[in-house]
Image (cartoon, rainbow, N blue to C red):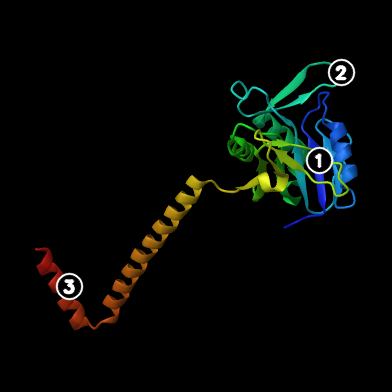
């Protein structure tokens, strides 16, 4: 399901270089969709009524071997950066959006990934969410950019070989739902319940048939069972 409303979410309360690009994004695409910008820790939260999607903004880390599942923001006043684990990002997201989770159709993890572990990061984020209802989690490959300056702005993903494509083509999705082991357990529980129900109903049929038959047949049946057991 598509929505014409989205939130650009900056999970950093610390000084960062994401706010200005988010403002540019909202301005460039305002004719296509209504955007609101929310920054973690801000007292000014303008939530959109109705259903909406959320873009979580951040940079991929330059040293994934040291920070395998983290995102980063750069400070504009100095050469420092703030690094958050994806679990911390999810916790901050829960704090800001917990009440509104039933209204969220998709969560888009819009940060660069050039090392091939975007799906694992998305799974960590999904497993940390506190929502009970299914939520689609989108994740991306490549180096992502804000909307371009074209007459018809697009978001692009760039790759080390010089190839680039629209970001939506570099996007994959997974669902915040019961996990595979829970699904297997649920299937096993269904099988067990079905088998138990079959045995119970078979027993009821035997008991019913026993009492519906005449006294003579019932005595013959009991005699047969005693002979067989001896």
Q: Tell me the CA gap for discs 1 and 2.
A: 23 Å
Relative placement, left or right, of 184 versus 92 is left
Q: Is residue 46 above or below residue 88?
A: below
Task: Between residue 103 and residue 86, name the one nearer to us.
Answer: 86
Residue 8 tag number: 1
Q: Who's the residue at 85% across and 34% down the image?
A: 21
Kindly state the secondary structure of the residue where label 2 is placed. Answer: loop
Kindly state the secondary structure of the residue where label 3 is placed. Answer: helix
Q: Tell me the CA gap for discs 3 and 2.
A: 94 Å
**Which residue is the extreme one toward the front?**
162
Q: Nearer the viewer, mark 1 or mark 2?
A: 2
Say whether residue 130 is visible: no
Q: Tell me the CA gap for discs 1 and 3.
A: 77 Å
Task: Name the quadrant of the N terminus.
Answer: bottom right
Q: Which residue is mark 3?
A: 222
- Image coordinates of residue 62 in percent, x first then y, are 67, 23
Q: Is residue 111 above or below residue 35?
A: above
Q: Earlier in the sequence, mark 3 or mark 2?
A: 2
Q: Who's the residue at 73% across and 33% down the image?
A: 92
Q: Earlier in the sequence, mark 1 or mark 2?
A: 1
Quadrant of the image occupied by residue 198: bottom left
Task: Between residue 150 and residue 70, name the one nearer to us.
Answer: 150
- Image coordinates of residue 181 in percent, x first then y, are 48, 45
Say whether residue 168 is visible: yes
């Amino acid at each position: 399901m598509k929505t014409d409303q989205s939130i650009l979410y900056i999970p950093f309360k610390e000084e960062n270089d994401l706010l200005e690009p988010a403002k540019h994004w909202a301005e460039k695409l305002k004719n296509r969709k209504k955007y609101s910008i929310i920054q973690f820790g801000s007292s000014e939260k303008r939530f959109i009524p109705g259903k909406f999607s959320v873009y979580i903004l951040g940079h991929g880390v330059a040293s994934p071997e040291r920070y395998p599942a983290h995102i980063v923001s750069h400070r504009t006043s100095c050469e420092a950066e703030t690094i958050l684990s994806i679990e911390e990002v999810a916790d901050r997201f829960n704090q800001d959006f917990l009440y509104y989770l039933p209204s969220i159709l998709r969560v888009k993890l819009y940060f660069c990934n050039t090392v091939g572990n975007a799906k694992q990061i998305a799974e960590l984020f999904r497993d940390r969410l506190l929502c009970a209802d299914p939520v689609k989690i989108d994740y991306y490959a490549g180096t992502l950019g804000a909307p371009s300056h074209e007459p018809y702005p697009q978001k692009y993903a760039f790759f080390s070989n010089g190839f680039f494509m629209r970001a939506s083509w570099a996007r994959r999705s997974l669902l915040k739902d019961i996990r595979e082991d829970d699904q297997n357990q649920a299937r096993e529980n269904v099988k067990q319940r079905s088998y138990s129900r079959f045995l119970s109903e078979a027993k009821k049929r035997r008991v019913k048939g026993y009492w519906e038959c005449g006294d003579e047949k019932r005595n013959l049946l009991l005699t047969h069972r005693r002979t067989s057991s001896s």
